[in-house]
Image: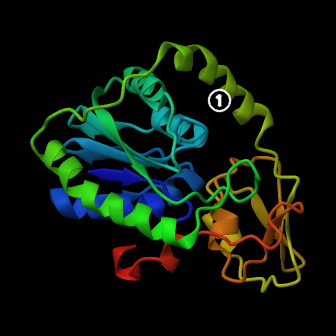
């Protein structure tokens, strides 16, 4: 079974194509995470977890979810991650997670997709031509990853360098603790009060007051709110003003999403 969380559609796109290629079910975890639904998930075939990368790791809320949900049936687990270009020592983090949840880790594959992290000038937006190129190259890679999973072989995860094990974990911890403030989020006068931002927030961090969204303190900087706003009304301080928002729906057939 393919399980996924996706903010701007990249991971959803990969997960659904992968599920089609291996002939397996595909389950979106968003509502389960939002409602704290930790009821068991059963699969007689290997589990395939598809996730975006947040600073060299899968999102913290997804890690915590898998520590609490019971995966029943097959004990093999693969990870497929989407990144904007660098997944870092993600293998170090997810291999530790699989030990905690007592699963047989079968490796991970990385798909380099367009970046959606528009709230920081440190992560330049992917230009449209490069977006199309990255999506096209990922399409070509799907069948090889699917074939490996279908045949029960391990995915060839990149080796984690010693310096990555030493330097990156403190950065990840610091980012999760101090780097995900929601204080900068607000809406411009383009807001149409549709409530979409609230519905796509995995942490239920957005409430509606006077028909407009208000952000709380529990933010993951997943970019779901800003990437899915139909009016491009969600802003982050002054950093996002005039910037193109990314959502994969601008580049692929909606039937694939």
In the rendered view, tell whether residue 178 sits above or below residue 148. Answer: above
Q: Is residue 35 among the parts visible in the rendering?
A: no
Q: In the figure, is residue 244 to the left or right of 57?
A: right
Depth order, front residue of 165/6: 165
What x and y, as percent, mark residue 235? 81, 67
| Quadrant in which the C terminus appears | bottom left
Q: Is residue 110 above or below residue 14?
A: above
Question: Tag 1, which secondary structure?
Answer: helix
- Does residue 156 appear in this view? yes
Task: Write the residue at 61% across / 65% down.
Answer: 200
Q: Quadrant of residue 223?
A: bottom right
Please rate how many residues cluster around mark 1, counting C-alpha atoms within 10 Å: few if below 14, some from 14 to 19, many from 20: some
**205 or 72, which is in the foreground?**
205
Q: Residue at x 51, y 46 (%)?
A: 85
Which residue is under mark 1? 172
Callout count: 1
Q: Quadrant of residue 167?
A: top right
């Amino acid at each position: 079974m393919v399980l996924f969380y996706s903010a701007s559609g990249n991971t959803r796109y990969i997960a659904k194509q992968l599920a089609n290629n291996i002939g397996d079910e595909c389950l979106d975890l968003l509502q389960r995470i939002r409602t704290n639904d930790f009821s068991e998930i059963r699969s007689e075939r290997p589990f395939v977890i598809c996730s975006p990368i947040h600073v060299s790791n899968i999102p913290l809320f997804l890690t915590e979810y898998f520590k609490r949900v019971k995966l029943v049936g097959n004990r093999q687990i693969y990870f497929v991650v989407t990144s904007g270009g660098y997944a870092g020592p993600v293998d170090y983090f997810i291999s530790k997670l699989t030990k905690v949840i007592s699963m047989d880790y079968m490796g991970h594959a990385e798909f380099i997709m367009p970046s959606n992290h528009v709230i920081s000038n440190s992560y330049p937006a992917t230009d449209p031509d490069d977006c199309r190129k990255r999506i096209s190259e990922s399409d070509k890679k799907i069948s090889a990853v699917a074939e490996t999973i279908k045949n029960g072989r391990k995915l060839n995860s990149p080796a984690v360098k010693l310096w990555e094990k030493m330097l990156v974990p403190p950065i990840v911890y610091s980012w999760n603790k101090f780097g995900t403030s929601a204080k900068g989020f607000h809406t411009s006068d383009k807001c149409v009060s549709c409530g979409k931002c609230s519905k796509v927030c995995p942490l239920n961090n957005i409430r509606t007051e006077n028909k407009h969204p208000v952000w709380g303190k529990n933010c993951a900087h997943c970019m779901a709110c800003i990437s899915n706003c139909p009016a491009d009304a969600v802003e982050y301080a002054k950093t996002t003003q005039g910037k193109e928002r990314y959502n994969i729906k601008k580049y692929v057939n909606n039937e694939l999403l």
